[in-house]
Protein backbone atom coordinates (compact mmCIF):
# COMPACT_ATOMS: atom_id res chain seq x y z
CA UNK A 1 0.00 0.00 0.00
CA UNK A 2 1.17 3.50 -0.85
CA UNK A 3 -0.14 6.53 1.06
CA UNK A 4 0.54 10.09 -0.04
CA UNK A 5 -0.54 13.43 1.42
CA UNK A 6 -1.45 15.89 -1.34
CA UNK A 7 -2.47 18.94 0.74
CA UNK A 8 -2.43 19.93 4.41
CA UNK A 9 -4.86 22.52 5.76
CA UNK A 10 -3.41 25.76 7.13
CA UNK A 11 -6.28 26.24 9.59
CA UNK A 12 -6.70 22.70 10.99
CA UNK A 13 -5.06 19.25 10.92
CA UNK A 14 -7.20 18.19 7.95
CA UNK A 15 -5.37 16.73 4.97
CA UNK A 16 -6.11 15.51 1.46
CA UNK A 17 -4.41 12.40 0.20
CA UNK A 18 -4.78 8.98 -1.36
CA UNK A 19 -4.16 5.35 -0.47
CA UNK A 20 -3.06 3.17 -3.36
CA UNK A 21 -3.78 -0.56 -3.05
CA UNK A 22 -3.76 -3.56 -5.37
CA UNK A 23 -7.50 -3.01 -5.88
CA UNK A 24 -7.41 0.69 -6.65
CA UNK A 25 -6.93 4.12 -5.15
CA UNK A 26 -8.90 5.64 -2.26
CA UNK A 27 -9.15 9.42 -2.03
CA UNK A 28 -8.88 10.59 1.57
CA UNK A 29 -10.53 11.67 3.82
CA UNK A 30 -12.98 8.87 3.17
CA UNK A 31 -15.92 7.06 4.75
CA UNK A 32 -15.35 3.31 4.82
CA UNK A 33 -18.63 1.49 4.28
CA UNK A 34 -19.40 -1.43 6.58
CA UNK A 35 -19.80 -4.85 4.95
CA UNK A 36 -19.81 -6.95 8.13
CA UNK A 37 -20.49 -10.33 6.54
CA UNK A 38 -18.98 -9.49 3.14
CA UNK A 39 -22.09 -7.54 2.17
CA UNK A 40 -23.48 -4.06 2.69
CA UNK A 41 -26.87 -5.16 3.95
CA UNK A 42 -29.63 -5.07 1.26
CA UNK A 43 -27.27 -4.01 -1.59
CA UNK A 44 -25.26 -5.88 -4.22
CA UNK A 45 -21.59 -4.98 -4.58
CA UNK A 46 -22.40 -3.29 -7.91
CA UNK A 47 -25.00 -1.10 -6.19
CA UNK A 48 -22.57 -0.19 -3.42
CA UNK A 49 -20.11 1.03 -6.04
CA UNK A 50 -22.83 3.31 -7.46
CA UNK A 51 -23.15 5.02 -4.03
CA UNK A 52 -19.63 6.49 -4.50
CA UNK A 53 -18.22 4.03 -1.94
CA UNK A 54 -14.47 3.71 -2.40
CA UNK A 55 -13.58 1.10 0.23
CA UNK A 56 -15.40 -1.29 2.59
CA UNK A 57 -14.57 -3.00 5.87
CA UNK A 58 -15.64 -6.55 6.72
CA UNK A 59 -15.71 -8.31 10.08
CA UNK A 60 -13.08 -10.95 10.82
CA UNK A 61 -14.96 -12.48 13.76
CA UNK A 62 -18.25 -12.95 11.89
CA UNK A 63 -16.62 -14.25 8.71
CA UNK A 64 -14.65 -16.72 10.81
CA UNK A 65 -17.95 -18.03 12.21
CA UNK A 66 -19.66 -18.20 8.82
CA UNK A 67 -18.78 -19.18 6.19
CA UNK A 68 -15.25 -19.59 7.59
CA UNK A 69 -12.04 -18.12 6.20
CA UNK A 70 -11.19 -21.35 4.35
CA UNK A 71 -14.36 -21.05 2.27
CA UNK A 72 -13.48 -17.45 1.39
CA UNK A 73 -9.87 -18.36 0.57
CA UNK A 74 -11.01 -21.23 -1.67
CA UNK A 75 -13.33 -18.80 -3.49
CA UNK A 76 -10.26 -16.71 -4.41
CA UNK A 77 -10.29 -14.31 -1.46
CA UNK A 78 -12.88 -11.90 -0.16
CA UNK A 79 -12.84 -9.62 -3.24
CA UNK A 80 -13.85 -12.43 -5.57
CA UNK A 81 -16.13 -14.01 -2.98
CA UNK A 82 -18.30 -10.87 -2.74
CA UNK A 83 -17.54 -9.54 -6.25
CA UNK A 84 -16.11 -6.26 -4.91
CA UNK A 85 -13.41 -4.89 -7.19
CA UNK A 86 -12.32 -1.95 -5.02
CA UNK A 87 -10.18 -1.88 -1.84
CA UNK A 88 -11.22 -3.72 1.31
CA UNK A 89 -10.31 -3.71 5.00
CA UNK A 90 -10.95 -6.37 7.62
CA UNK A 91 -11.01 -5.53 11.32
CA UNK A 92 -9.22 -7.78 13.80
CA UNK A 93 -12.05 -9.11 15.96
CA UNK A 94 -11.00 -6.81 18.80
CA UNK A 95 -14.29 -4.91 18.77
CA UNK A 96 -16.15 -8.15 19.54
CA UNK A 97 -14.07 -8.42 22.73
CA UNK A 98 -16.00 -5.31 23.77
CA UNK A 99 -19.39 -5.81 22.09
CA UNK A 100 -19.82 -9.44 23.23
CA UNK A 101 -18.18 -8.69 26.58
CA UNK A 102 -18.55 -5.61 28.77
CA UNK A 103 -20.52 -3.76 26.07
CA UNK A 104 -23.21 -6.43 26.31
CA UNK A 105 -22.96 -6.63 30.12
CA UNK A 106 -23.50 -2.89 30.65
CA UNK A 107 -25.62 -2.13 27.58
CA UNK A 108 -23.37 0.68 26.39
CA UNK A 109 -21.50 1.52 23.21
CA UNK A 110 -18.23 3.40 22.71
CA UNK A 111 -19.77 6.63 24.01
CA UNK A 112 -21.01 6.38 27.60
CA UNK A 113 -24.80 6.41 27.95
CA UNK A 114 -26.55 8.51 30.57
CA UNK A 115 -27.27 6.59 33.75
CA UNK A 116 -24.40 4.11 33.38
CA UNK A 117 -21.84 4.34 36.19
CA UNK A 118 -18.28 5.25 35.23
CA UNK A 119 -15.41 3.13 36.59
CA UNK A 120 -17.71 0.13 37.09
CA UNK A 121 -15.11 -2.26 35.61
CA UNK A 122 -12.13 -2.88 37.88
CA UNK A 123 -8.77 -4.46 37.09
CA UNK A 124 -9.74 -8.00 38.13
CA UNK A 125 -13.17 -8.03 36.43
CA UNK A 126 -14.11 -10.33 33.54
CA UNK A 127 -17.15 -10.09 31.22
CA UNK A 128 -19.93 -12.60 31.89
CA UNK A 129 -19.86 -14.42 28.54
CA UNK A 130 -16.23 -14.22 27.35
CA UNK A 131 -12.85 -14.69 29.04
CA UNK A 132 -9.96 -12.32 28.34
CA UNK A 133 -6.47 -13.75 28.95
CA UNK A 134 -2.92 -12.59 28.31
CA UNK A 135 -2.85 -14.66 25.11
CA UNK A 136 -6.24 -13.82 23.65
CA UNK A 137 -9.96 -14.21 24.21
CA UNK A 138 -12.28 -17.20 24.69
CA UNK A 139 -15.73 -16.72 23.15
CA UNK A 140 -18.90 -18.76 22.84
CA UNK A 141 -19.96 -18.83 19.20
CA UNK A 142 -23.24 -16.92 18.69
CA UNK A 143 -23.93 -19.40 15.87
CA UNK A 144 -23.72 -22.78 17.62
CA UNK A 145 -22.50 -22.07 21.17
CA UNK A 146 -19.15 -23.78 20.65
CA UNK A 147 -16.11 -22.45 22.49
CA UNK A 148 -13.64 -20.60 20.29
CA UNK A 149 -10.38 -18.77 20.91
CA UNK A 150 -9.15 -15.64 19.15
CA UNK A 151 -5.76 -14.06 19.77
CA UNK A 152 -3.24 -12.08 17.71
CA UNK A 153 -1.86 -15.10 15.85
CA UNK A 154 -5.34 -16.46 15.09
CA UNK A 155 -6.56 -13.05 13.92
CA UNK A 156 -3.61 -12.71 11.52
CA UNK A 157 -4.16 -16.19 10.09
CA UNK A 158 -7.86 -15.53 9.52
CA UNK A 159 -7.30 -12.10 7.95
CA UNK A 160 -4.56 -13.42 5.67
CA UNK A 161 -6.90 -16.13 4.37
CA UNK A 162 -9.68 -13.57 3.85
CA UNK A 163 -7.27 -11.49 1.76
CA UNK A 164 -8.34 -7.86 2.26
CA UNK A 165 -5.95 -5.08 1.21
CA UNK A 166 -5.71 -3.64 4.73
CA UNK A 167 -5.88 -5.66 7.95
CA UNK A 168 -5.77 -4.65 11.61
CA UNK A 169 -3.81 -5.85 14.61
CA UNK A 170 -5.75 -7.72 17.30
CA UNK A 171 -6.57 -5.58 20.33
CA UNK A 172 -8.97 -5.18 23.21
CA UNK A 173 -11.48 -2.42 22.60
CA UNK A 174 -12.11 -1.09 26.11
CA UNK A 175 -15.43 -0.04 27.63
CA UNK A 176 -16.29 3.54 28.67
CA UNK A 177 -17.05 2.18 32.16
CA UNK A 178 -13.56 0.68 32.67
CA UNK A 179 -11.50 2.37 35.37
CA UNK A 180 -7.91 3.54 34.96
CA UNK A 181 -6.22 0.38 36.28
CA UNK A 182 -8.31 -1.92 34.08
CA UNK A 183 -7.58 0.25 31.03
CA UNK A 184 -3.86 0.29 31.79
CA UNK A 185 -3.67 -3.52 32.08
CA UNK A 186 -5.75 -3.86 28.90
CA UNK A 187 -3.35 -1.54 27.10
CA UNK A 188 -0.39 -3.74 28.06
CA UNK A 189 -2.13 -6.70 26.39
CA UNK A 190 -2.97 -4.67 23.27
CA UNK A 191 0.68 -3.56 22.93
CA UNK A 192 1.97 -7.10 23.40
CA UNK A 193 -0.53 -8.40 20.84
CA UNK A 194 0.49 -5.67 18.36
CA UNK A 195 4.08 -6.95 18.40
CA UNK A 196 2.89 -10.54 17.93
CA UNK A 197 0.74 -9.49 14.97
CA UNK A 198 3.72 -7.87 13.26
CA UNK A 199 5.79 -11.02 13.75
CA UNK A 200 2.96 -13.33 12.67
CA UNK A 201 1.95 -11.61 9.41
CA UNK A 202 3.37 -13.39 6.36
CA UNK A 203 1.36 -11.69 3.61
CA UNK A 204 1.87 -8.49 1.61
CA UNK A 205 -1.31 -6.97 3.07
CA UNK A 206 -1.01 -3.57 4.75
CA UNK A 207 -1.20 -3.97 8.54
CA UNK A 208 -2.54 -1.20 10.77
CA UNK A 209 -1.79 -1.07 14.49
CA UNK A 210 -4.51 0.11 16.88
CA UNK A 211 -4.10 2.81 19.52
CA UNK A 212 -6.14 2.31 22.70
CA UNK A 213 -6.09 3.94 26.15
CA UNK A 214 -9.70 4.93 26.66
CA UNK A 215 -10.49 8.39 27.96
CA UNK A 216 -7.19 8.65 29.85
CA UNK A 217 -4.79 11.18 28.35
CA UNK A 218 -1.55 9.62 29.58
CA UNK A 219 -2.60 6.15 28.40
CA UNK A 220 -3.69 7.44 24.98
CA UNK A 221 -0.35 9.23 24.54
CA UNK A 222 1.58 6.21 25.78
CA UNK A 223 -0.27 3.97 23.33
CA UNK A 224 0.19 6.35 20.40
CA UNK A 225 3.93 6.55 21.08
CA UNK A 226 4.28 2.79 21.40
CA UNK A 227 2.11 1.75 18.44
CA UNK A 228 3.42 4.69 16.37
CA UNK A 229 6.97 3.48 16.99
CA UNK A 230 6.29 0.06 15.48
CA UNK A 231 6.62 -0.61 11.71
CA UNK A 232 2.90 -0.61 10.91
CA UNK A 233 1.66 0.60 7.52
CA UNK A 234 -0.97 2.78 9.16
CA UNK A 235 -2.83 3.25 12.42
CA UNK A 236 -6.31 2.67 13.74
CA UNK A 237 -7.64 4.67 16.67
CA UNK A 238 -10.00 2.51 18.69
CA UNK A 239 -11.75 2.16 22.00
CA UNK A 240 -14.14 4.43 23.80
CA UNK A 241 -14.38 8.21 23.86
CA UNK A 242 -15.76 8.98 27.32
CA UNK A 243 -19.21 10.44 27.83
CA UNK A 244 -19.14 13.50 25.57
CA UNK A 245 -18.52 13.64 21.84
CA UNK A 246 -17.42 17.26 22.20
CA UNK A 247 -14.26 15.93 23.87
CA UNK A 248 -13.45 13.61 20.98
CA UNK A 249 -11.40 16.11 18.88
CA UNK A 250 -9.19 16.79 21.91
CA UNK A 251 -8.77 13.08 22.56
CA UNK A 252 -7.87 12.53 18.91
CA UNK A 253 -5.29 15.32 19.15
CA UNK A 254 -3.53 13.52 22.02
CA UNK A 255 -3.07 10.54 19.71
CA UNK A 256 -2.43 12.19 16.35
CA UNK A 257 0.29 14.44 17.76
CA UNK A 258 2.29 11.28 18.55
CA UNK A 259 1.71 9.27 15.36
CA UNK A 260 4.01 9.38 12.30
CA UNK A 261 2.64 12.08 10.02
CA UNK A 262 3.26 10.27 6.75
CA UNK A 263 1.13 7.22 7.54
CA UNK A 264 -2.69 6.96 7.29
CA UNK A 265 -4.95 7.22 10.34
CA UNK A 266 -8.23 5.33 10.61
CA UNK A 267 -10.88 6.03 13.24
CA UNK A 268 -12.74 2.85 14.12
CA UNK A 269 -16.52 2.91 14.41
CA UNK A 270 -17.22 6.66 14.44
CA UNK A 271 -18.99 8.52 11.64
CA UNK A 272 -22.26 10.32 12.29
CA UNK A 273 -22.75 13.28 9.95
CA UNK A 274 -22.18 15.69 12.84
CA UNK A 275 -18.86 13.93 13.66
CA UNK A 276 -17.33 14.07 10.22
CA UNK A 277 -16.01 17.60 9.94
CA UNK A 278 -14.59 17.50 13.47
CA UNK A 279 -12.73 14.22 13.02
CA UNK A 280 -11.42 15.24 9.61
CA UNK A 281 -10.22 18.58 11.01
CA UNK A 282 -8.48 16.59 13.76
CA UNK A 283 -6.44 14.78 11.08
CA UNK A 284 -8.33 11.54 10.43
CA UNK A 285 -7.94 10.05 6.93
CA UNK A 286 -10.49 7.22 6.96
CA UNK A 287 -13.32 6.19 9.28
CA UNK A 288 -15.99 3.48 9.27
CA UNK A 289 -19.54 3.67 10.52
CA UNK A 290 -22.77 1.66 10.29
CA UNK A 291 -25.04 4.72 10.62
CA UNK A 292 -26.16 5.12 6.97
CA UNK A 293 -27.08 1.44 6.64
CA UNK A 294 -28.34 0.81 10.17
CA UNK A 295 -30.66 3.83 10.12
CA UNK A 296 -31.95 2.89 6.65
CA UNK A 297 -33.23 -0.39 8.07
CA UNK A 298 -35.12 1.64 10.68
CA UNK A 299 -36.80 3.68 7.94
CA UNK A 300 -34.64 6.80 8.35
CA UNK A 301 -33.42 8.87 5.38
CA UNK A 302 -30.61 11.40 5.80
CA UNK A 303 -31.23 14.55 3.75
CA UNK A 304 -30.17 18.17 3.46
CA UNK A 305 -33.38 18.94 5.40
CA UNK A 306 -32.39 16.62 8.24
CA UNK A 307 -33.36 13.06 9.18
CA UNK A 308 -36.73 11.88 7.86
CA UNK A 309 -38.66 9.00 9.42
CA UNK A 310 -40.17 7.58 6.27
CA UNK A 311 -42.55 5.31 8.20
CA UNK A 312 -44.64 8.34 9.13
CA UNK A 313 -47.98 8.47 7.32
CA UNK A 314 -47.48 12.09 6.28
CA UNK A 315 -45.04 10.96 3.56
CA UNK A 316 -47.70 8.87 1.76
CA UNK A 317 -48.99 12.16 0.37
CA UNK A 318 -45.57 13.53 -0.66
CA UNK A 319 -44.86 13.03 -4.35
CA UNK A 320 -41.32 14.37 -4.22
CA UNK A 321 -37.77 12.98 -3.93
CA UNK A 322 -36.25 12.15 -0.53
CA UNK A 323 -33.89 15.09 -1.11
CA UNK A 324 -34.33 17.60 -3.98
CA UNK A 325 -30.57 18.30 -3.87
CA UNK A 326 -29.53 14.65 -4.20
CA UNK A 327 -28.56 13.06 -7.52
CA UNK A 328 -28.58 9.43 -6.40
CA UNK A 329 -30.56 6.84 -8.34
CA UNK A 330 -33.25 6.70 -5.66
CA UNK A 331 -33.90 10.44 -5.60
CA UNK A 332 -33.95 10.61 -9.40
CA UNK A 333 -36.36 7.70 -9.85
CA UNK A 334 -38.51 7.27 -6.73
CA UNK A 335 -40.71 9.46 -4.53
CA UNK A 336 -41.34 9.71 -0.80
CA UNK A 337 -44.89 8.38 -1.15
CA UNK A 338 -43.68 5.13 -2.71
CA UNK A 339 -40.90 4.55 -0.16
CA UNK A 340 -43.31 5.30 2.69
CA UNK A 341 -45.81 2.85 1.21
CA UNK A 342 -43.15 0.12 0.97
CA UNK A 343 -42.13 0.60 4.60
CA UNK A 344 -45.70 0.57 5.88
CA UNK A 345 -46.46 -2.51 3.76
CA UNK A 346 -43.43 -4.33 5.16
CA UNK A 347 -41.70 -4.57 1.77
CA UNK A 348 -37.96 -5.22 1.91
CA UNK A 349 -37.22 -3.09 -1.16
CA UNK A 350 -37.72 -0.01 1.05
CA UNK A 351 -34.55 -0.90 2.96
CA UNK A 352 -32.59 -1.25 -0.28
CA UNK A 353 -33.72 2.19 -1.51
CA UNK A 354 -33.01 3.93 1.80
CA UNK A 355 -29.63 2.21 2.20
CA UNK A 356 -28.59 3.24 -1.30
CA UNK A 357 -29.66 6.85 -0.72
CA UNK A 358 -28.06 7.13 2.74
CA UNK A 359 -24.71 5.73 1.59
CA UNK A 360 -24.70 8.04 -1.43
CA UNK A 361 -25.62 10.99 0.80
CA UNK A 362 -22.84 10.22 3.32
CA UNK A 363 -20.24 9.73 0.60
CA UNK A 364 -21.31 12.98 -1.08
CA UNK A 365 -21.07 14.73 2.30
CA UNK A 366 -17.44 13.57 2.68
CA UNK A 367 -16.77 14.50 -0.95
CA UNK A 368 -17.85 18.07 -0.09
CA UNK A 369 -15.52 18.07 2.92
CA UNK A 370 -12.63 17.03 0.67
CA UNK A 371 -13.47 19.96 -1.59
CA UNK A 372 -13.49 22.31 1.43
CA UNK A 373 -9.98 21.16 2.36
CA UNK A 374 -8.90 21.76 -1.24
CA UNK A 375 -10.32 25.28 -1.08
CA UNK A 376 -8.73 25.97 2.30
CA UNK A 377 -12.09 26.33 4.07
CA UNK A 378 -11.48 23.74 6.80
Image (cartoon, grey):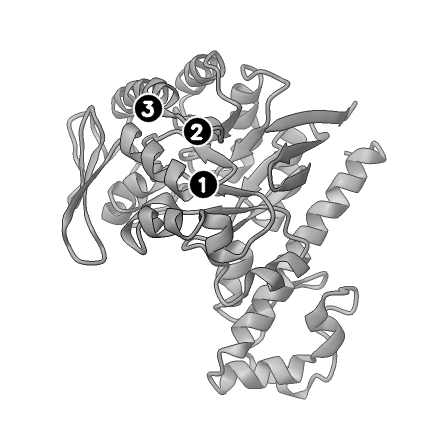
Which residue, given by chain and number where applicable, does mark 2 sit on? 203
Q: Residue at x 25, y 41 (%)?
A: 102
Q: Is residue 9 left or right of residue 189?
A: right
Q: Earlier in the sequence, mark 1 or mark 3?
A: 1
Instruction: State the image coordinates of residue 215 (x, y, percent, origin top left).
Output: 41, 27
Q: Earlier in the sequence, mark 1 or mark 2?
A: 1
Q: Residue at x 47, y 12 (%)?
A: 225
**Marks 3 and 2 close (CB-CB < 8 Å):** no
Question: Could you say whether the residue bearing mark 2 is in a helix, strand or loop?
Answer: loop
Q: Is residue 349 left or right of residue 53?
A: left
Which residue, given by chain and number where applicable, does mark 1 sit on? 163
Question: Could you say whether the residue bearing mark 3 is in a helix, strand or loop?
Answer: helix
Q: Is residue 377 above or below residue 302?
A: above
Q: Which mark is residue 101?
A: none
Q: CA distance from mark 1 to mark 2?
A: 9 Å
The residue closer to the viewer here, 32 or 225, is 32
Q: Residue at x 54, y 33 (%)?
A: 266
Question: Could you say whether the residue bearing mark 1 is in a helix, strand or loop?
Answer: loop
Locate residue 32: give its quadrant. Answer: top right
Which residue, given by chain and number where applicable, does mark 3 sit on? 190
**Marks 1 and 2 close (CB-CB < 8 Å):** yes
Q: CA distance from mark 1 to mark 3?
A: 23 Å
For the N terminus, which image quadrant?
Answer: top right
* Residues packed near mark 2 inside 10 Å, few (<14), some (14 to 19) or many (20 plus): few
Instruction: State the image coordinates of residue 233 (x, y, percent, origin top left).
Output: 53, 23
The residue closer to the viewer here, 148 or 273, is 148
For the C terminus, which image quadrant?
Answer: top right
Q: Earlier in the sequence, mark 3 or mark 2?
A: 3
**Number of callouts in the render?**
3
Residue 377: tell me if it is visible: no
* Residues packed near mark 3 inside 10 Å, few (<14), some (14 to 19) or many (20 plus): many
Amino acid sequence: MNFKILKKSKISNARLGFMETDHGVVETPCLVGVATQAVVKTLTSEEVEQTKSQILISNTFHLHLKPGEKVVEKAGGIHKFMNWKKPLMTDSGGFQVFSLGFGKDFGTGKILKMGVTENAIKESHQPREIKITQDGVYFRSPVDGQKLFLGPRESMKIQQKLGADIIFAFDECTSPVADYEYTKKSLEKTHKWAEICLKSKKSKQALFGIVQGGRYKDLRIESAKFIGGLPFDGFGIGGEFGNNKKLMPQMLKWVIDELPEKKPRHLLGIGYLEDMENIIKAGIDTFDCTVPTHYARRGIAFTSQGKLNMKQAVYVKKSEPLDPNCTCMVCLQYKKNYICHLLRAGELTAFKLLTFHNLHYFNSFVEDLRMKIKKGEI
